[in-house]
Amino acid sequence: MKKKISSVILCVVLSLSLLAGCGGRSGGQAAGEGKAKAGREGDISIALDADVTTLDNNVIDLPADFTVVRAMQDGLMEQTDTDLKPGLAESYEVSPDGLTYTFHLRDAKYSNGEVIKAEDFVTSWRRLVDPETGSAYAWFAGAAGVENADAIAFEGGAAQTLGISAPDEKTVVVKLDRQVPFFTAIITMPCFAPVSEAFVKEHEGRYGQSGEDILSSGAFMVDEWVPGSGSIRLKKNPEYWNAAAVSVETLTFRTVMDEQSGILSYQAGDLDVVGLHGDMAAKYASDPALDIQLSPKMEYLYLNHSNSFLSSKALRQALSKALNKDDITKGILKDGSESADYFVPKNFAYDDKGVAYHDAVKLEPSGYDTAKALELWEEAGKELGTEEVSLELLYDDTTEGKNIAQYLKSSLEKALPGLTVELREVPYAACWDEQKAGNFDMTISSWMADYIDPSSYFDMLMSTNEYNLGNWNNPEYDGYCRDATTLFASDPEARREAYGKAEQVILEDVGLIPLYQTGDSSLIRPGISVKFAPFGSYLFRYATKTQE
């Protein structure tokens, strides 16, 4: 992106999958039989897999932060589990050429009672693209097509030239430099939520670092948070414009990194929502409290195309065909994940007829074929002049990362004689840095859309994109993607067809190897209802809880 994608590719488990991996069973009690803890009638307690680091909506970059901030901040538009609709904007109009959006704000206030004004969106969006802010999502404004966004973020342009203005306190005008079909979807991201300039200045250097140093424009506000404590509690924001739709009084997010302690906390009634992975997900498959969602998060095996061996197309194709991905999803993960011979996820980006992108395009996937893999391997050996190939596989130190890496090594070495896969395990937090630096031959990493459009995936593999981890460069692919965003911006069918051609190029040239589409398995206490959003996470702001 010179794009920077949220999704925050954090190695093997990069995700906006916002729940901790928790599991285990104790005393023979089924998970769903846990008791609701006394005194928590109006609270829902959710497991996170990491501490919250900041609540600054312009700079958040980690899954746990996104989970919490989504419950706290509203933008001009809002993505629910089924609809894209106005949020802090009561209504909006689009100019005939599709380049100017005019939003009319509803009457709304921050959690301190301060009126939310149009100028607050100007402040936030300028702050987002200001290099001094250091936002990982500065590229998002450019991806949204906001006029001069990239020039400001990456070329030293003046913030005042950004294509957003506030002609009065209730009107926000956004000018685009090109038609962007997904503009209203992308601005649902928290980085586009309003920011009070006066409040930021008053809390300079501390903004977003404590409950006292942040304002909420959304359903919840901070009740109690000590950074690094492993817990943050939010309470219902009484000033929220749509407070009547919020039925839960508090949300408590707790860091739970140990699977056994997570499930024990669930059974004790201290946690209401915990994630399950691997054998734990399989163990609770028949539990009525188990909720399984197919996330738009895709797991890929990235290949470094700068590597002399991997520059061989035949070798890349051999690697792709040598993998039985069902062994990963059914043998290791067991959490509802589906093996993938596709780049863009299923059940994602529906058109106006209710047809998902994946179902509309015609692909010819590679598929598992050990005989063909061996044939291609031998072809690659002749091309490269060697029968011995050694490739390093970079992965993180999570249990899931270790298990998948071990499987890839054994499976590839068994199918392709002469191949040696050397494993390099690094700490979870360091893996992304190694990937960005290109310090790998192969690496496991993920991608998940931040907005509901196929471009959120396709942009990632453009030759100019910094998230093109393997430095794949295919002019044909770039051309199809450019056509989709320019020539066919206002023609949905032609745009989808261009993206379908681009996806076929990825599969045939093996720009990377799709492994699986992630399944999210979570135990959700009976009596609690939480909607799952199409961007791949639960919407806790609209959760409900009934007492049994």
Image (cartoon, rainbow, N blue to C red):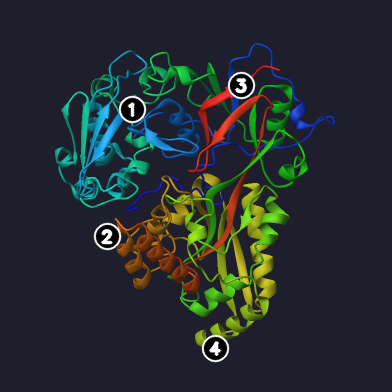
Identity of the residue drawn at 56% across and 65% down: 392
Give the camera-side residue of 315 and 122. Answer: 122
Say what secondary structure mark 3 lies in. Answer: strand
Separation of marks 4 and 3 at Cα, in angstroms: 64 Å
Separation of marks 1 and 2 at Cα, in angstroms: 30 Å
Q: Earlier in the sequence, mark 1 or mark 3?
A: 1
Separation of marks 2 and 4 at Cα, in angstroms: 42 Å
Residue contact between numbered discs 1 and 2, judged by CB atoms under 8 Å: no
Separation of marks 1 and 4 at Cα, in angstroms: 62 Å
Q: Earlier in the sequence, mark 2 or mark 4?
A: 4
Q: Earlier in the sequence, mark 1 or mark 2?
A: 1
Residue contact between numbered discs 1 and 4, judged by CB atoms under 8 Å: no
Residue 252: image location, x then y, percent: 56, 22
Q: Amino acid at mark 1?
A: Leu
Residue 362: image location, x then y, percent: 50, 67
Say what secondary structure mark 2 lies in. Answer: loop
Q: Amino acid at mark 2?
A: Thr
Per the rendering, the mark at residue 88 is 1
- Count neighbours of disc 3 (C-alpha within 10 A) and say few if under 14, some if 14 to 19, many if 20 or more: some
Say what secondary structure mark 4 lies in. Answer: helix
User: Mark 2 highlights which residue?
Assistant: 486
Per the rendering, the mark at residue 545 is 3
Q: Amino acid at mark 3?
A: Lys
Residue 507: image location, x then y, percent: 50, 69
Q: Earlier in the sequence, mark 4 or mark 3?
A: 4
**Mark 4 or 3, closer to the camera:** 3
- Count neighbours of disc 4 (C-alpha within 10 A) and say few if under 14, some if 14 to 19, many if 20 or more: few
Residue contact between numbered discs 2 and 4, judged by CB atoms under 8 Å: no
Q: Earlier in the sequence, mark 1 or mark 4?
A: 1
**Mark 2 or 4, closer to the camera:** 2
